[in-house]
Image (cartoon, rainbow, N blue to C red):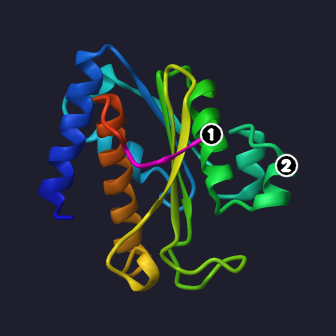
Amino acid sequence: MKEADLDAVAADVVATLAARRQTVAFCESLTAGLAAATLAGVPGASKVLRGGLVTYATDLKISLAGVAPNLIARHGVISAHCAKAMAVGGRDRCDSSWGVSLTGVAGPDSQDGHPVGEVWIGLASPTGGVTATRATGDGAEGLLPGDRCAIRSAAVAEALRQLRRAVAGEDTGAVPS
């Protein structure tokens, strides 16, 4: 996604959340704050962006986001389960309407048997619904293609698109809890 397109999606997210008087918080692993920073680049973002958690390390997913250690032991940090728990943790700990999480592998090496480009996005809604979606791209086996920078940028773009659709009440194609 071109930078101008990403900026337009971010601006639309801010406008849509502001119109509904809702807020968002992020819990980010592989993107390390890039999603929150992208949204913060939009004028007026302070009306909707509560903040975020950068939980790059596994122990921070537990201590900051409240992801259960047994969930990580059973499913790993690169999973729909972890993405859902991170989204709830970000939403609840930042006292926001929506929580968005990103977890995955940006590379250059695979992690815990997961290939480079595998990314999970979690959404926690104001009504308590929680979903997770595997981001897909043009890469092999539906993985996000490219180097670390490209994968992280594509993950942020997809997370913001999903958030925009969810806030607008559209189907995101995500797996519900």
- The image quadrant where one finds the C terminus is top right
Tell me the kind of residue under disc 2. Answer: Pro
The numbered mark at residue 11 is none
The residue mark sitting in front, 1 or 2, is 1
Q: Position of residue 97 (x, y in %)?
A: 47, 21
Q: Is residue 100 visible?
A: yes
Where is 142 relative to 75, above or below? below
- Secondary structure at badge 2 equals helix
135 vs 150: above or below = above
- Helix, strand or loop for disc 1: loop
- Magenta stretch mostly in which secondary structure? loop
Q: Measured along the vertical axis of the image, is residue 41 above or below residue 117? A: above
- Residue occupied by mark 2: 69
Q: Nearer the viewer, residue 26 or 20?
A: 20
Give percent across and percent down for residue 69.
Answer: 85, 49
- Residue 75, given in percent of the width and then of the height, sits at 76, 60
Disc 1 designates what residue?
Answer: 177
| 127 in the magenta segment | no
x and y percentages locating residue 89 in the rendered image? 64, 34
> 45 or 91, which lies in front?
91
Query: Is residue 119 positioned above or below 160 on the image?
Result: below
Instruction: Provide the residue span drawn in magenta.
Output: 172-177
Bin the neighbour count of mark 2 within 10 Å (Cα to Cα): few under 14, some 14-19, many 20 and up. Answer: some
- N-terminal-most mark, 1 or 2: 2
> Does 173 appear in magenta?
yes
Q: Is residue 44 visible?
A: no
User: Picture quarter containing residue 57?
Assistant: bottom right
Q: CA distance from mark 1 to mark 2?
A: 18 Å
Which residue type carries mark 1?
A: Ser
Q: Is residue 2 left or right of residue 158?
A: left
- Residue 171's image quarter? top left
Is 167 positioned to the left or the right of 177 in the image?
left
